[in-house]
């Protein structure tokens, strides 16, 4: 049981380049989300999905796209990288069962835009 | 919208002593969940403790306990008998409708 797998772990991009951060989970969770972590700001929600084919914006969606074609995968696309997108990115999947929430985070991607 | 405030950017504690991290939140919901997450230098997000708002009893997990004051919207974390492995950043988080909102974090350093 791998949990949440994020790739790559590190990436350097030039301004204007595009790329996709991959996220896959094998727990059959319906809910998946992407966060970015910046110093002094905690983790902020970028986009989330409540199931295959359904996505919505979080707190800081500008410059990012997502899609959810399967329950397992939730890639995050940077359309035209900017230095302001230098950050650590986390993917998470979660469930809600009865009175229990469960959140599982990926190991994170450190992205630097130069 | 929910907001989570952690007013202590950094804290330092001697090994074996106790440290308390503060967290306040703002919400209009009556039923919700609160969490404390630990992030060591490895960057991994580790769940430390969870509290359901409808439960008046404070949650405890071994050396970690919370003081949950619902009326004051306060959710502090106490680490007892601090160990070197407790050195990490700690995030307070609030969940409603699947979405987690995080505080800015508190860096805890345990001194030998």
Image (cartoon, rainbow, N blue to C red):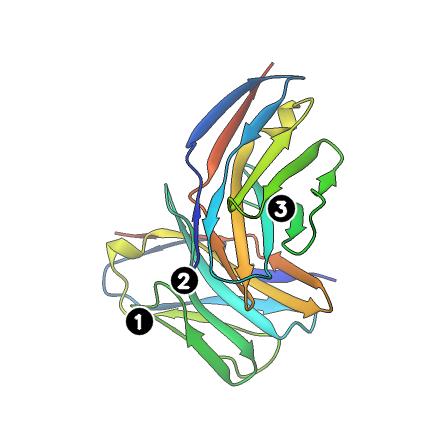
Q: CA distance from mark 3 to mark 2?
A: 25 Å
Chain bearing mark 2 = B
User: Would you say B109 lies left or right of A56 here?
Assistant: right
> Which quadrant of the figure has residue A95?
bottom right
* Picture layout, residue A13 above or below residue B78: below
Return the residue at label 1.
Answer: A79
User: Would you say A3 lies left or right of B7 here?
Assistant: right
Q: Are marks 1 and 3 on the same chain?
A: no
Chain bearing mark 3 = B
Q: In x, y percent, where is residue A42?
A: 43, 47
Mark 3 vs mark 2: in front: 2
Nearest to the observer: residue A106 or residue B95? B95
Q: Give neighbour class at mark 2: few <14, some 14-19, many 20+ (Cα, 10 Å).
A: few
* Picture layout, residue B51 above or below residue B14: below
User: Would you say B80 lies left or right of A84 here?
Assistant: right
Q: Give neighbour class at mark 3: few <14, some 14-19, many 20+ (Cα, 10 Å).
A: some
Mark 1 vs mark 3: in front: 3
Mark 2 vs mark 1: in front: 2
Checking the image for residue B46, the label placed there is 3
For the residues labelled 2 and 1, say whether their Cβ atoms are less than 8 Å apart. no
* Picture layout, residue B29 above or below residue A28: above
User: Would you say A94 lies left or right of A21 here?
Assistant: right
Which type of secondary structure does the marked residue at label 1 adopt?
A: loop
Q: Tag 2 or tag 3, which sits nearer the N-term?
A: 2
Checking the image for residue B1, the label placed there is 2
Q: In x, y percent, where is residue A59?
A: 37, 63
């Amino acid at each position: 049981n791998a949990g949440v797998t994020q790739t790559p772990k590190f990436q350097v991009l030039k301004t204007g380049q595009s790329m996709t951060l991959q996220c896959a989970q094998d727990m059959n969770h319906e809910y998946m989300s992407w966060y970015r972590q910046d110093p002094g700001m905690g983790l902020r929600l970028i986009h989330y999905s409540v199931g295959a084919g359904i996505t919505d914006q979080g707190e800081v969606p500008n410059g990012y796209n997502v899609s959810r074609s399967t329950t397992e995968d939730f890639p995050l696309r940077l359309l035209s990288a900017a230095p302001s997108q230098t950050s650590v990115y986390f993917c998470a999947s979660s469930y809600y069962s009865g009175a229990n929430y469960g959140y599982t985070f990926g190991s994170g991607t450190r992205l630097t835009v130069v | 919208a929910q907001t989570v405030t952690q007013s202590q950017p950094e804290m330092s504690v001697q090994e074996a002593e106790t440290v308390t991290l503060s967290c306040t939140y703002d919400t209009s919901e009556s039923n919700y969940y609160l969490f404390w997450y630990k992030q060591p230098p490895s960057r991994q997000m580790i769940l430390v403790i969870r509290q359901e708002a409808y439960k008046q009893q404070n949650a405890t997990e071994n050396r970690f306990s919370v003081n949950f004051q619902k009326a004051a919207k306060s959710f502090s974390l106490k680490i007892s008998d601090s160990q070197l492995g407790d050195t990490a950043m700690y995030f307070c988080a609030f969940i409603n409708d699947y979405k987690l909102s995080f505080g800015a974090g508190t860096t805890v350093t345990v001194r030998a």
